[in-house]
Image (cartoon, rainbow, N blue to C red):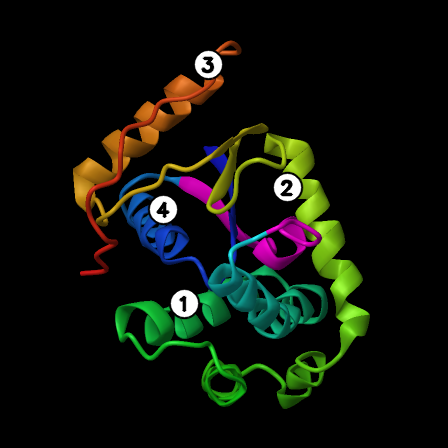
Amino acid sequence: MDKVDFYFDVHCPWAWVSSRWILEVEANKEIDLTFRPMSLAALNEGRDLPEAYRAKMDNSWAPMRVVFAAEELCGSDAVKALYTAIGTRVHTDGEGGPSRELVAEEVAKVGLPESLMDAWDSPEWDDALRRGQKKVSELVGDDVGTPTITVNGVSFFGPVLSSIPRGEDAVRVFDGAVALSSYPDFYELKRSRNTSPRFD
């Protein structure tokens, strides 16, 4: 059975597409899947960014504090449930954010303790985000983002998908990504992006 770690930041729509793909893989192939948070804010800390993107990064600390708190205090199953709940509203339903109210509602809906929301305004969790991101950067470098995936100890950025492969297509994409990434001298496969992410 393939062991898969899927690293995400709730803000990234491309990671959301890939996360729904890896769940399709899980439904059609026996894999041991764990969702793990990473932090685009920590990755981009101190970098010179366009103003609009910098604002997004500044706003991304708080919700990811809650996700990291969920991982540490409630475990990986809680992370999977919370990411699915938040991501559905932010990306699939197009509600934007994620705002404090939205995250608090989803924490409650998935049955996690209300006290997780204490992390929202607590910079004490920022070191956890930095440590988590450092781990991801050690796996794949610091010039890539989310999604980052580790399969059987081999890590790579992507795949970045504009739509969600379903069923057998999902498994074929997975097997192809694993085959390429397992070749020790494989570096990059890329083409220009000409479409927005689709979540259906």
Report the disc number at residue 186. Answer: 3
Residue topped by disc 4: 22
- Quadrant where the N terminus is found in the figure: top left
Q: Are marks 1 and 3 in contact (CB under 8 Å)?
A: no
- Tell me where the magenta segment starts and ends, as one range: 31-48
Choose top left, top right, bottom left or bottom right for residue 173.
top left
* Lower sequence index among marks 3 and 4: 4
**Which residue is located at x 63 percent, y 68 percent?**
61
User: Disc 2 residue type?
Assistant: Val
Near mark 2 (Cα within 10 A), the count class, few <14, some 14-19 or many ≥20, is many
User: Disc 4 residue type?
Assistant: Ile
* Lower sequence index among marks 1 and 4: 4
Residue 190 x/y as whole percent: 33, 27
User: Disc 3 residue type?
Assistant: Phe
Near mark 1 (Cα within 10 A), the count class, few <14, some 14-19 or many ≥20, is some
* Alpha carbon separation for disc pair 2 and 3: 19 Å
* Lower sequence index among marks 1 and 3: 1
* Lower sequence index among marks 2 and 1: 1
Please tell me whether mark 4 sits on a helix, a strand or a loop: helix
Choose top left, top right, bottom left or bottom right for residue 174.
top left
* Alpha carbon separation for disc pair 4 and 2: 18 Å
Badge nearest the viewer, 1 or 3: 3
Report the disc number at residue 136. Answer: 2
Badge nearest the viewer, 2 or 1: 2
Front-most of residues 137 and 2? 137
* Alpha carbon separation for disc pair 2 and 1: 21 Å
Report whether 140 appears left or right of 33.
right
